[in-house]
Image (spheres, rainbow, N blue to C red):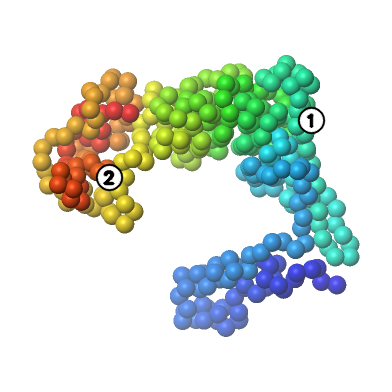
């Protein structure tokens, strides 16, 4: 018989597919391509539902903190849980299939249970061993070009590297704060650094080849919660922290070269850029209260300097003293960072 849930709005159902009339209209040119594509995409979204013939079996009691699908084959799913369990699933090949209903069950190919401080070789920061993390697994990442290795970060203040073939820990980086996020550059050819965000303001870059922390990026004022490498460059890293800032770093230079400040924004319905371009020229206004150091100037790439740049006022900056809602918008000379830049 047919598998369960067939024809009930799942992606396996043909309900979302274009009809013969729609195809003829598209072929004759009476239906515009964008309209045809939007119609099919909308029906695909409406038809999306939980799979009725596939189950991912979980072998833990707590919630799931992170999921990561490998970029190499788009097949192996890495999961980290609240109760310190790490699991790897094959989403393509099921472990078993019910011959009557066709229902497929996916059991974990690898399951690393919660470890213990006494049983872990070398303690919490031990280099090798099969013991898992001591506390919640907060983040996970595959090695970008090979599914034979993956990394996990945990609230036990460690980042661990795992061998997928032996399901064992081959390397561990100990820190002095909870690990919130890790990431690796998907297109790096010159390095294999792991960016680590922890409860401290510093961003750490770990090198699995040497087993050491090679970079410490300083600039945030609170815990670093998010790290992502740019797709366009293997050297550019974006980080977000509890201080509300998003910073961009060129790891070949000192200091962040761009800062997106949460306190220096306007309401979403106001086009600050358009208003700033129409602002009158009122003379030079420095971008920061302190003179630029040589380190800060060197950290700014040449393409960010401009001969005619505009400084957008933040909320509350430049208000009139009488309580009015007039915001200051002033054009200055000296480039995107001005003659008095700060990071």
The residue most toward the bottom is 21
- Of 180 and 68, which appears nearest the observer? 180
Q: Which residue is mark 1?
A: 166
Instruction: Give the quarter of the image for residue 286.
Output: top left
Residue 104, horizontal then vertical, whole percent:
81, 57
Instruction: Give the quarter of the image for residue 213.
Output: top right
* Number of disc labels: 2
The residue most toward the right is 100
The residues bearing labels 1 and 2 have C-alpha atoms spaced at a distance of 55 Å
Identified at 71% across, 37% down, the residue is 83
Visible residue check, residue 14: yes
Quadrant the N terminus occupies: bottom right
Rendered image: mark on residue 315? 2
The residue most toward the top is 122
Residue 95, horizontal then vertical, whole percent:
83, 50
Residue 301, horizontal then vertical, whole percent:
33, 31
Residue 163, horizontal then vertical, whole percent:
73, 30
Disc 1 secondary structure class: loop
Asked if residue 179 lies left or right of residue 292, the reply is: right
Instruction: Give the quarter of the image for residue 180.
Output: top right
Q: Which tag is nearer the camera, tag 1 or tag 2?
A: 2
Is the residue under label 2 in contact with that under label 1 (CB below 8 Å)?
Answer: no
Identified at 67% across, 34% down, the residue is 136
Rendered image: mark on residue 233? none
């Amino acid at each position: 018989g047919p598998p369960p849930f067939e024809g009930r709005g799942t992606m396996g159902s043909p309900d979302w597919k274009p009809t013969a009339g729609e195809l003829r209209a598209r072929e004759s040119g009476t239906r515009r391509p964008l309209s045809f594509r939007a119609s099919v995409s909308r029906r695909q979204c409406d038809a999306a539902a939980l799979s009725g013939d596939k189950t991912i079996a979980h072998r833990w009691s707590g919630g799931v903190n992170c999921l990561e699908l490998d970029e190499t084959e788009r097949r192996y799913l890495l999961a980290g849980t609240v109760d310190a369990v790490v699991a790897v699933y094959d989403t393509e090949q099921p472990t078993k299939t019910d011959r009557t209903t066709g229902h497929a069950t996916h059991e974990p190919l690898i399951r690393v249970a919660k470890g213990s401080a006494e049983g872990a070789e070398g303690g919490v920061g031990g280099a090798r061993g099969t013991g898992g993390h001591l506390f919640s697994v907060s983040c996970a990442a595959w090695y970008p070009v090979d599914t034979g290795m993956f990394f996990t970060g945990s609230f036990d203040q460690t980042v661990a590297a795992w061998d997928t073939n032996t399901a064992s820990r081959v390397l561990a980086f100990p820190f002095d704060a909870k690990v919130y996020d890790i990431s690796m550059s998907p297109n790096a050819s010159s390095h294999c650094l792991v960016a680590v965000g922890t409860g401290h303001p510093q961003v750490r870059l770990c090198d699995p080849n040497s087993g050491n922390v090679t970079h410490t990026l300083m600039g945030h004022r609170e815990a670093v919660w998010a790290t992502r490498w740019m797709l366009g460059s293997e050297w550019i890293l974006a980080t977000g922290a509890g201080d509300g800032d998003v910073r961009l770093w060129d790891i070949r230079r000192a200091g962040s070269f761009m800062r997106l400040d949460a306190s220096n924004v306007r309401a979403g319905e106001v086009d600050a850029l358009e208003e700033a371009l129409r602002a009158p020229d009122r003379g030079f206004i420095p971008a920061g209260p302190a003179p630029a150091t040589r380190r800060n100037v060197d950290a700014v790439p040449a393409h960010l300097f401009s001969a005619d740049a505009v400084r957008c006022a933040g909320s509350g900056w430049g208000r009139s003293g009488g309580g009015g809602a007039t915001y200051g918008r002033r054009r200055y000379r000296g480039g995107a960072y001005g003659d008095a830049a700060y990071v």
